[in-house]
Image (tube, helix red, strand yellow):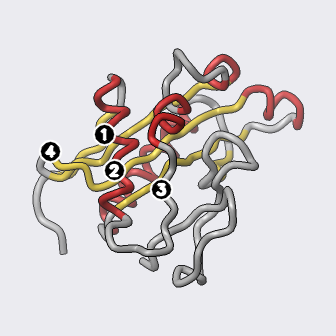
Amino acid sequence: MHTGNLEATEVQTKRDRHEMVMFPWTVYRGDKNWVPPIIQERERLLDPDQNHFFLQADVALWAARRDGRVVGTIAAFIDHRFNDYLKQQVGFFGFFEVLDDHEAAEVLLGTARDWVQQHGMSELHGPINFHRDRERGILLEGTDCPPPMLCGHSPPY
């Protein structure tokens, strides 16, 4: 059981984004099968001034903090080109990383769900990191093996 104040705060500044980019090193500490992303590439991916995806999508980033310490991260987004092409109302979540903290995971997923609903979406799909060919899914088994290229890697919990 986790104690302390838990809240989801929006990631808005360059410093906040850097903290979000670096958080997986905490989650996967000691995991010999985790392949870390390239830090500069990940920072550009999450920077609205450097990633053209932000021109076609609404994006919100959050960090879950327990007593001020990051315990999880998530992005919620609406890809308007995807929805226009398929005539759907789908929101997505990605960049979902969380310590072994069920409450933090619930807060993050609930925050993403509420955000896409507030933006008129009827479904939430994920995890997917902005593009269907980039790090998607959660491992249900196989955490003891190296991940395939561009696929998600998740802790066993």
Residue on which the image places disc 3: 36
The three-letter code of the residue at mark 2 reads Phe
Q: Nearer the viewer, residue 133 or 138?
A: 133
**Residue 1: x, y in percent?**
18, 75
Residue 116 found in image quarter: top right
Residue in the picture at 42% in, 77% down: 157
Q: Residue at coordinates 30% horizontally, 67% vertically from top-left?
A: 101
- Mark 3: which secondary structure? loop
Work out how far the residue at label 1 is from the one at label 4, CA to CA, in angstroms.
12 Å
In this rendering, would 23 be left or right of 77? left
Separation (CA) of disc 2 from disc 3: 11 Å
- Residue tagged 1: 19
Mark number displayed over residue 157: none
Lower position in the chain sequence, tag 1 or tag 4: 1
Dot 4 amino acid type: Gly
Residue found 49% across the figure and 41% down from its top: 75
Q: Residues within 10 Å of mark 4 (few under 14, many from 20)?
A: few
Q: In this view, does 80 lie above or below 3?
A: above
Q: Which residue bears the numbered disc 4?
A: 68
